[in-house]
Image: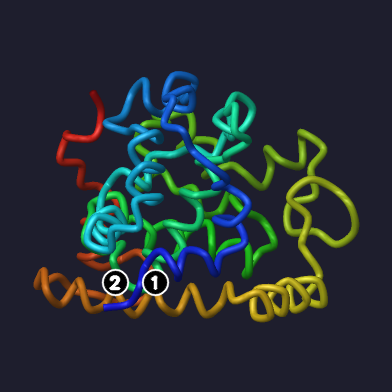
Amino acid sequence: MDNLFDKLMEDIRFEEGLNACMNCGVCTAICPAAEFYSYDPRKIVDIVQSRNNELIEDLLKSEQIWYCGECMSCKTRCPRGNAPGLIIMALRGLSQDLGYFTESEKGRQQLAIKRTIGESILNTGYCVYIDGISPEFHPEQGPTWEWVHENRVDLIERLGGNYKGDGPGILRKIPQETLDELKKIFEVTGGLERYEKIESYSKKKAAEMNLDFDEGIDNEYFSHIYKTNNGSHTR
């Protein structure tokens, strides 16, 4: 088995995030996520610095590492200058690299994030683009959003936007040259490789769960990870 602590040490975020934790619990006290989720950054840091391979593997397969909102409140209060939020980033990255993320409900949702926000960045230049926020997948928005979505061309024009237009303006079309440059950044930094791993491990998990797996969002596995909530995440 790989030494998981050593692998975490290869991530600059981990190196910057863990100095010398004395387990005081201030990070948990200030953490907004800990107030609502079954989440304790103090315990996570304690597990990591124990260097116990089995415990770290369990952590990589757990729900807990996906609850952090990366607000970095922990960094501002830690008396030793630790940043549990950065440690969580490193744990998430390693979980994705090794495929452990598919062992938890929240972890499996990484495919949904990749196929919505992740692919939107590369295809449109926007993290969230109005075309992708369909009423079907966002019923919580109600009938008002359905009307906005159906009438977005006229509505955005009336509001002074430049929907899919050339030149400046809100929701403007991002030039292909810029999109190509953006994709190159993802390629050089390992983002595209991370995307491929998320797809590969998710496909394997879908087969284990006997769920249809295909590109896009119209398949059984995507629908399952997008909509399923076992109700055990909050306090």
Residue displayed at 49% across by 58% down: 90
* Label 2, residues with CA under 10 Å away: few <14, some 14-19, many ≥20: many
Of all residues shown, which one is farthest toward the right? 167
Left or right of residue 156: residue 133? left
Closest to the observer, 37 or 119:
37
Closest to the observer, 131 or 116:
116
The spot of residue 44 in percent (x, y) is 36, 42
Which residue has dot 1 on it?
198
Up the image or down, 5 lies above or below 192; here it is: above
Up the image or down, 176 lies above or below 76; here it is: below
* Label 1, residues with CA under 10 Å away: few <14, some 14-19, many ≥20: many
Residue displayed at 33% across by 37% down: 43
Left or right of residue 104: residue 72? right
Numbered tag placed on residue 43 in the rendering: none
What kind of residue is marked 2? Answer: Ser
Q: Quadrant of residue 102?
A: bottom left
The spot of residue 130 in percent (x, y) is 58, 48
Mark 2, secondary structure of its residue: helix
State yes or no: discs 1 and 2 in contact (Cβ < 8 Å). yes
The reply to whether residue 108 is in sight is no
The reply to whether residue 39 is in sight is yes
What kind of residue is marked 1? Answer: Ile
Question: In whole angstroms, how far apart are the C-alphas of marks 1 and 2?
Answer: 6 Å
Numbered tag placed on residue 202 in the rendering: 2
Q: Quadrant of the N terminus?
A: bottom left
Residue displayed at 11% across by 74% down: 208
